Amino acid sequence: MPVRNILRSICEEKLSIPNPYQLRKITGLAQGTCLKIWGEPDYLPDRGVMEKLCETLNLQPGDFIIYEPSKPKGEIN
């Protein structure tokens, strides 16, 4: 899927949040939601979750949702 969430890398590299349990503690989001965001890059959180992430982590949706275009058929590398 070309649209992905990169929240895990943002948390680990820029926010010093080492795991989904800390993410849950900081944001107040459900544990299942945090585990899904953390472990499934193809998971796109709904609007309420994105608003909570933006509010508590001082982010914009474009900081943790990215688009990676698919390679055209026949393109190598």
Image (cartoon, rainbow, N blue to C red):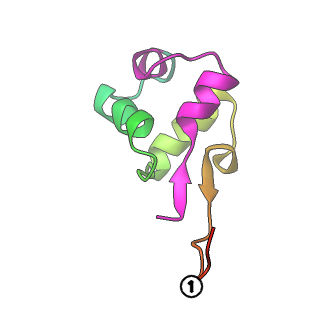
- For the point 43% across and 34% down, the residue is 38
Q: Residue 10 is drawn in which quadrant? A: top right
Question: Does residue 51 appear to the left or right of 19 in the view shown?
Answer: right
Residue 70, horizontal then vertical, whole percent: 57, 72
Q: Quadrant of the C terminus?
A: bottom right
Find disc 1 in the rendering and name its residue.
74
Residue 39, horizontal then vertical, whole percent: 39, 36
- For the point 55% across and 42% down, the residue is 51
Residue 62, horizontal then vertical, whole percent: 68, 51
- For the point 70% across and 24% down, the residue is 14
As drawn, which residue projects farthest toward the left?
A: 32
Residue 63, horizontal then vertical, whole percent: 69, 44
Residue closest to the eye, 40 or 53: 40
Q: Is residue 13 above or below residue 69?
A: above
The amino acid marked with disc number 1 is: Gly
Q: Is residue 24 magenta?
A: yes
Q: Residues within 10 Å of mark 1 (few under 14, many from 20)?
A: few
Residue closest to the eye, 26 or 10: 10
Q: Is residue 5 magenta?
A: yes
Tell me where the magenta segment starts and ends, as one range.
Answer: 1-25
